[in-house]
Amino acid sequence: MHLSDFDYNLPPERIAQTPIEPRDASRLLVLHRDTGEIEHRAFRDLSEYLSPGDVLLLNQTRVIPARLPAHKVPTGGAAEILLLRPLDDRRWVAIVGGKRIQTGTQLVVGREDGDHLTATIIEEQEENQRIVEFNAPIQPYLDELGETPLPPYITTPLADPNRYQTVFAREDGSAAAPTAGLHFTPDMLVDLKRQGIEFAYCTLHIGLDTFAPVREDDITQHKIHRERSILLPEDAQIINQAKLRGNRVVAVGTTSVRTLETAAIRSAAYGTPYNDANSVQATLASLAYNTCPWRPVIAIDEETDLYIIPGYRFRAVDVMLTNFHLPRSTLLMLVSAFAGREQILRAYEDAIQREYRFYSLGDACLLV
């Protein structure tokens, strides 16, 4: 398929610049994949599309203040470090902005006459990515020296940085929020539990590589970067038990989709539905693997570069909850693989006509 197959025109005024209040007051477009029917609801109506025993898979990653203003030594020239992922406690893969930033360049993060750290560029990678080594672990200083990174299409300052965090965020590490989860409120989560909805959690630390533009006309030639993806044994067990009962797994966000599908692919690679680390019940372990109508998942903790485009066969995800994605993006390709390119583009056009709010701080889309 060609990159132009995933293009659409979005008026700039449809890009959400501020979060809606309260969180669950956002709109919800519901696309029925089997019939193509589209419904227009509020996010707080989500429970009407769920049944007791269904599982919501939530990405509990937390956005760190990953944008670090800096200046060069000794010239004082302005620079900026955007942390993507750690290699150890001092070395990070980062996007570094500024003129003539090359191997050996030293940067000061913070004020030289106050608290500050130094960073040295130790390796140049593709485009403007660099490996940066700090003179001390940066993590304890992030709240003081860093800023919350926002996508470039959001030009309005965020009054409350917590609005770019999900209410269930636990694990520090992301440069961007898993935005499909931003719509949930604590009360809504409690109500869903009371209705018999189950929860499982994963962690995928999002780097801005996820949003890197696709430049190849042949989308199969695009290379997606790796991101750390974690599914613990107890969460794999919750998912497998739900599937065995005949309930659905609802992946909240494309990051949860990629984690869950990676875990299912690893299950197939091992040639067995479970590994010892999952500690599932013997009745589950005795399930006839070759006759199983779904793909069991296993616990994982690895770097995933799973790239989902139309033609991909989903192994574990039954329902997807997501936001609206940029044209020509890998995320638009992913949802097109799940619900069909033509149906997705038709739903997006309908959403534009009905003045939905798009992208990270915008409205949600439920693909059932």
Image: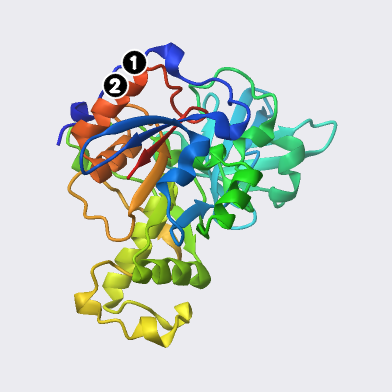
Q: Secondary structure at mark 2?
A: helix
359 and 186: which one is in front? 186
Work out whether 10 lies above or below 123: above
Q: Is residue 166 left or right of residue 215?
A: right
State which quadrant residue 20 falls in. Answer: top right
Q: Which residue is mark 1?
A: 353
Location of residue 227 in the rendering, given as x and y in whole percent from the top left corner: 44, 52
Q: Secondary structure at mark 1?
A: helix
In this view, which residue lies farthest toward the left? 1
Q: Is residue 23 left or right of residue 301?
A: right
**Where does the C terminus fall, quadrant-wise?**
top left
Q: Hey, what amino acid is under mark 1? A: Gln
Work out whether 110 lies above or below 253: above
Q: Say which residue appears at 51% left-offset and 28% top-offset.
A: 151
**Where does the N terminus fall, quadrant-wise?**
top left
Residue contact at pointers 2 and 1, CB within 8 angstroms: yes
Location of residue 218 in the rendering, given as x and y in whole percent from the top left corner: 17, 36
Colour mapping used in the image: rainbow
Q: Hey, what amino acid is under mark 2? A: Glu
Inter-mark Cα distance, 2 to 1 = 6 Å
State which quadrant residue 25 falls in. Answer: top right
Q: Say which residue appears at 26% left-offset and 55% top-offset.
A: 314
Crowding near pointer 1: few (<14 within 10 Å), some, many (20+)? few
Location of residue 277 in the rendering, given as x and y in whole percent from the top left corner: 47, 79
Q: How many circles with numbers are drawn on the protein?
A: 2
- Residue 39 seen in the current view: yes
Q: Which residue is mark 2?
A: 349
- Residue 298 seen in the current view: no
Location of residue 197 in the rendering, given as x and y in whole percent from the top left corner: 50, 57
Q: Say which residue appears at 24% left-offset and 73% top-offset.
A: 292
